Amino acid sequence: MTLNILFAANETGWAEYEPHLRHWLAEAGIEAQLGPDLGPPSEIDYIVYAPSSEVQDFRPYSRLKAVLNLWAGVEDVVGNPTLQVPLARMVDNGLTEGMVEWVVGHVLRYHLDIDHALANQSGEWLPKVPPLARNRPVTVLGLGALGSACAKALAALNFPVTGWSRSAKSVAGVSCLSGPEGLEQALARAQILVLLLPLTPGTENMLNAPHIDQLPEGCCILNPGRGPLIDDTALLEALDSGHVGHATLDVFRTEPLPAEHPYWSHPRVTVTPHIASATRAETASKVIVDNIRRGEQGKPFLHVVDRQRGY
């Protein structure tokens, strides 16, 4: 049987993904019609999907077996009432590697105070010796695939790492906490705070004024997770007061970040344009095809989203 696989991702380049998807389909021995326009929805077996796609009503896709998301985030599709088949989020080695590199790079930038060196190019000799990593506590909020990988990488560099998640987790080399009391402890330890929580109704505005107040004076914040995890007004007030020393932000409520947004001009904010962990066509395509192969073999799909939890 020849499968019909719809590529439905407005903001993702079909030209970029096509050769990689075709390669991995051939490797898996799967015969398929593949593309962004395949005719009647009733004949589609799988949708390779980005939530920005024009496909928002899944009811016409009566033969659909699964929707295979190209993004790690599913908050823009998980609540769609017309989606009744399994939804798989993207969990990809390339995506994870990119996130680890971004997080470790910016944690080291803060730890070594590289910004100080870059700002002081006047010829004045001003040595500023950082502590060793073992004396710089880092907290990671969110211990899913990305958060756990980042926490382990930082622990391997000898940072004392605390990880927090809503449900209890265990990560080698990381002090893992959960629940409201655990969150309070995790925040209180954080000289550097990394936000890698999924976006759900329970995590929106997680970093609000009361939680920011629990951070140590001068804490630095990294947010490569989701923009709405942060109460922007509360963060700006904490940056203005100096309670938060600096924030490096990769994700925002509105993207691209509007040119007039105060984050752009704030001296204690670094903006990066949602680059911390981009989906890469070569590695993501293999993940997609592996799930199609499993579906055709009658095996459970990998990385299926729990609709109740939202991720």
Image: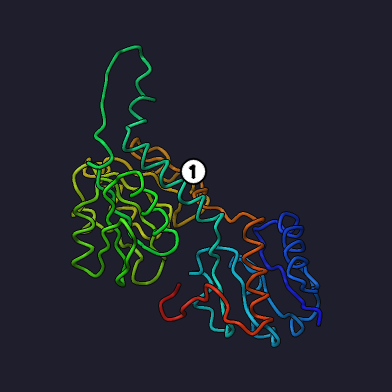
Q: In this view, does 123 lie to the left or right of 302?
A: left
- In this view of the protein, which residue sits in the foreground, 112 or 267? 112
The residue type indicated by label 1 comes to Ala
Tally the marks: 1
Can you identify the residue that label 1 sits on? Answer: 259
- In this view of the protein, which residue sits in the foreground, 74 or 29? 29
Pinpoint residue 235: horizontal percent, then vertical percent. Answer: 30, 50
Pinpoint residue 214: horizontal percent, then vertical percent. Answer: 18, 55
**In the image, is residue 227 above or below residue 159?**
below
Pinpoint residue 276: horizontal percent, then vertical percent. Answer: 49, 49
Residue at 33 percent across and 59 percent down: it is: 172
Q: In this view, does 163 lie to the left or right of 43?
A: left
- In this view of the protein, which residue sits in the foreground, 3 or 25? 25
**In the image, is residue 203 above or below residue 135?**
below
Residue at 81 percent across and 83 percent down: it is: 1
Pinpoint residue 10: horizontal percent, then vertical percent. Answer: 67, 62
Quarter that holds the C terminus? bottom left
Q: Quadrant of residue 260?
A: top left
